[in-house]
Amino acid sequence: MSSAARNSKTAYAYLGPAGTFTELALRQVAAAAGQEWKPVLTVADALAAVLAGKAQRAIIPVESSVEGGVGATLDALATTEGLQIYGEYLVPVNFNLVAKPGVKLSDVKTIAAHPVAYAQVRKWLSANVKGHKHLHSTSNAAAASDLWENAKLDAAVSTPNITDHYMVKVLAKNIADNKHAETRFIEVGKKGALPKRTGHDKTSLIVELPNDRPGALLEMLEQFATRGVNLSRIESRPVGDRLGRYRFNVDANGHATDEAVAEAVQGLYRFSPKLIFLGSYP
């Protein structure tokens, strides 16, 4: 492929390496098919790539049905200017136990797993691989890769798509303790035109309260309630400058061009000393 052809492609930064749940989210982005996919190590790296023009969009996790909001993403969105959300993608979170060819389940004594993944499959492993030892891996994909790096490892907890990237066999499928777990990912780019209203939209905001006084949070919520705007998520994160100061990450049902949502946002601009509008998207 010529350099000109590569340069004509749109770049998408995502949390790598290949084989992660973030890659599964990226597969859902219709416009990303056939484009350049750039694996990065952290949320900060993904957003930095967007701001530097090295990637047009970043796909990053924002919320887990098991663990709640992803702090690294929420904090980065609150402290990094010039970003906008253009879409969201839900990925079912399940895990397989994989090993090198020739290994049987009865052979498994030492297992590689990312700590978060291990916590979500512990019950299954305790029941089916009794007395096993757990070694930490840096990601779900790295757990599979570690099988070739560490001779002490017998198996790894990894993602359903890991067999697309590594020569491993599946010893057991769907071993997550919570069979309905999901992670929500967002597509982030530089600020630009809002996606068109679809009728099934979400508007994301970050709101700081004006001061620490009784009723301040209620006053913020009334901006939505009095206009009939439903909130699908509200989550607090510390501002970080001192104890007791929090900002609120809010997802409201509706598009910024909807009259009720637009009025609520304008009310928040009058109320809050710092309001970050992150966009409206399907």
Image (tube, grey):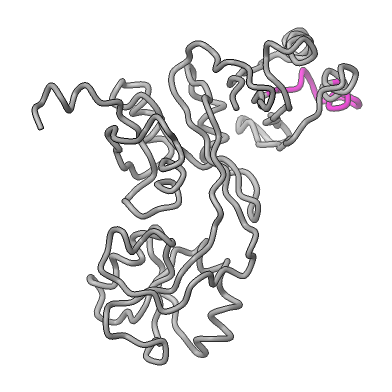
Foreground of the two, 281 or 50: 281
Q: Position of residue 66 (x, y in %)?
A: 65, 56
101 relative to 211 in the view: left or right:
left
User: On the rendered structure, is 84 left or right of 232?
Assistant: left
Q: Is residue 90 above or below residue 9?
A: below
- Which x, y percent locates residue 81? 49, 18
Magenta highlight on residue 215: yes
Q: Residue at x 65, y 59 (%)?
A: 180
Magenta range is 207-219
Vertical side of 66 occupied by 90: above or below: above
Q: Is residue 176 left or right of residue 12?
A: right
Residue 53 quadrant? top left
Image spot of residue 159 (x, y percent): 43, 61
Identify the image quadrant of the N terminus. top left
Between 67 and 8, the residue placed more toward the observer is 8
| 2 displayed left or right of 222 | left
Q: Is residue 84 magenta?
A: no
Total marks in image:
0
Q: Which residue shows up at 54% across the image and 39% down it?
A: 89
Please name the residue shown 34% across and 35% down the image.
33
Name the residue: 39% across, 82% down: 110
* 46 and 180: which is toward the camera: 180
Along the viewing direction, whichever of 180 and 73 lies nearer the viewer: 180
Q: Quadrant of residue 255?
A: top right
Which residue reaches farthest left?
A: 2
**Residue 86, relative to residue 155: is it above or below?**
above
